Amino acid sequence: MVITENRTGARLRTWRRSMDLNQNELAGKLDIDVTTVRKYESGATLPNGSVLTKACEMGLDINWLLSGKGSMLQIDVYERYAPEATPYITAVADALLSLSLADPQKFTLLAKGFAARGEEALRLAHLEHREQQRIQGPNLVGDDDGSDSSI
């Protein structure tokens, strides 16, 4: 078995975790077997066209998945999946764009801090969600234990 460059698999794992899904849950949404998800995430193989289409329909930006360029999520994903967040996201994006043009150094400082705080908040939300699941009982459909399992 040839192992492909694992960046695509790592990005796929990042996307899956950003949705707070385990490997079984993502497999179900993509209509594939969980071992296929594991192969993708480990870099053993790349997603086929059908899987890429389904991931795109879920809001993943395929250019980001395959190349690492651009945003993880499609631009209109917020309007489709979180319409209540759209005005805030737009306002933040507009303010950051204006600041980047007016004072690039302040923009860089603010953007880095904002991204770091956002990632921290997301990690905390995931931990709280997992703790809530633990309190409610075991997950009978299987779970990703956070390890980067490979085949």
Image (cartoon, rainbow, N blue to C red):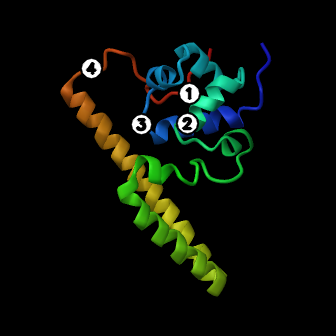
**Nearest-to-viewer mark from 1 and 3:** 3
Task: Looking at the image, tell me whether mark 1 or mark 2 is earlier in sequence order.
Answer: 2
In the rendered image, which quarter is residue 1 located in?
top right
> Badge 4: how crowded within 10 Å, few (<14), some, or many (20+)?
few
- The residue to which callout 2 is attached is 57
Q: Residue at x 71, y 44 (%)?
A: 63
Task: Looking at the image, tell me whether mark 1 or mark 4 is earlier in sequence order.
Answer: 4
**Nearest-to-viewer mark from 4 and 3:** 3
Which numbered circle lies on residue 138? 4
Residue placed furthest toward the bottom: 102
Q: Amino acid at mark 3?
A: Asp
Pointer 2 and pointer 3: residues touching (CB < 8 Å)? Answer: no
Alpha-carbon distance for marks 2 and 3? Answer: 17 Å
Task: Looking at the image, tell me whether mark 2 or mark 3 is earlier in sequence order.
Answer: 3
**Nearest-to-viewer mark from 1 and 2:** 2
Point out residue 71 in the picture as x, y percentages from the top left corner: 62, 52
> Badge 2: how crowded within 10 Å, few (<14), some, or many (20+)?
few
Which numbered circle lies on residue 148? 1
Alpha-carbon distance for marks 1 and 2? Answer: 25 Å
Q: Secondary structure at mark 4?
A: loop
- The residue to which callout 3 is attached is 20
Quadrant of image for the C terminus: top right
Residue 47 seen in this snapshot: no
